[in-house]
Image (cartoon, grey):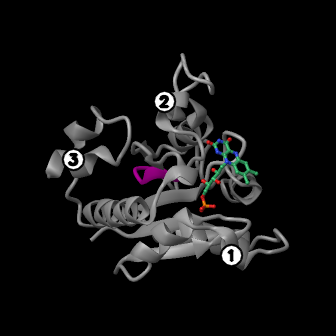
Amino acid sequence: MKKILILFAHPAFQKSLINKTLMEAIKDLKSVTINNLYEKYPDFFMDIPAEQKLLTEHDIIIWHHPFYWYSAPAIIKEWMDLVLQHGFAYGTHGRALEGKWAMSCISTGGRKEVYSAEGKNRYTINEFLAPFIQSANLCRMKNLPPFVVHGSHTLNKDDIKKYAEDYRKVIKMLRDNEIDSEKLNTMEYMNEIIEHNA
Ligand SMILES: Cc1cc2nc3c(=O)[nH]c(=O)nc-3n(C[C@H](O)[C@H](O)[C@H](O)COP(=O)(O)O)c2cc1C
């Protein structure tokens, strides 16, 4: 079984619908650790050695958050700036993350159509996620496609339930090493693995 670390960030968790539901759907899974950053560090004062230790103890690292200003809530950036140190995460001797997998799980207000060259937001989600993808790459990690929930304000209860079920399935598949690496190269979003396996 792979060990999965969820780096969860929602600055207004009490108002969250989507991410709270997704998180609830996976929190009881064996071999999955939820690291709720805003809950743990309300003052942003991070325990860097503890965060680095968590990273070394897991095989798959997931940044899970709502998409804010085409990126992540601030604490994720703080975590990256402080925890992914030279000599630990990158650089000649910084090999602590080598070979681990990285993935983003995000929800967006915008529908899928607006995330394209022709759409209102002009870029795709994978283009917006370049800083995450390339940071993982610099740390010698392997990237997984993102799990994405689009159009968060238009979803009904059943839609959200389905996304939460799919997220649980994806996390279990990753944990149990059931993902065909050839399929990974063909997918824009991790959500598609569910259809691939249906
Ligand atoms: C500060 C802020 C910035 C946001 N920026 C974006 C954005 O850049 N693109 C987008 O599609 N949605 C954006 N949204 C919408 C959120 O992504 C959406 O409300 C969230 O994914 C819903 O998840 P939740 O129910 O867990 O809060 C933003 C919302 C807030 C509050």
Residue 111, horizontal then vertical, whole percent: 52, 39
Q: Which mark is residue 160?
A: none
Q: Amino acid at mark 3?
A: Glu
Q: Which mark is residue 14?
A: 1
Task: Mark 1: give few (<14), some (14-19) or many (20+) Cα within 10 Å.
Answer: few
The answer to whether 179 appears left or right of 96 in the picture is left
The answer to whether 114 appears left or right of 181 in the picture is right
Instruction: Residue under label 3, please give it.
Output: 195
Confirm if mark 2 falls within 8 A of ligand 1.
no
CB within 8 Å, label 2 to label 3? no
Total numbered badges shown on the rendered structure: 3
Q: Amino acid at mark 1?
A: Gln
Q: Which mark is residue 113?
A: 2
Main secondary structure type of the part rendered in magenta: strand
- Residue 141 belongs to the span the image colors magenta: no
Q: Amino acid at mark 2?
A: Glu
The quarter of the displayed image where residue 27 is located:
bottom left
Task: Mark 2: give few (<14), some (14-19) or many (20+) Cα within 10 Å.
Answer: some
Secondary structure at numbered mark 2: helix
Above/below status of 62 relative to 52: above
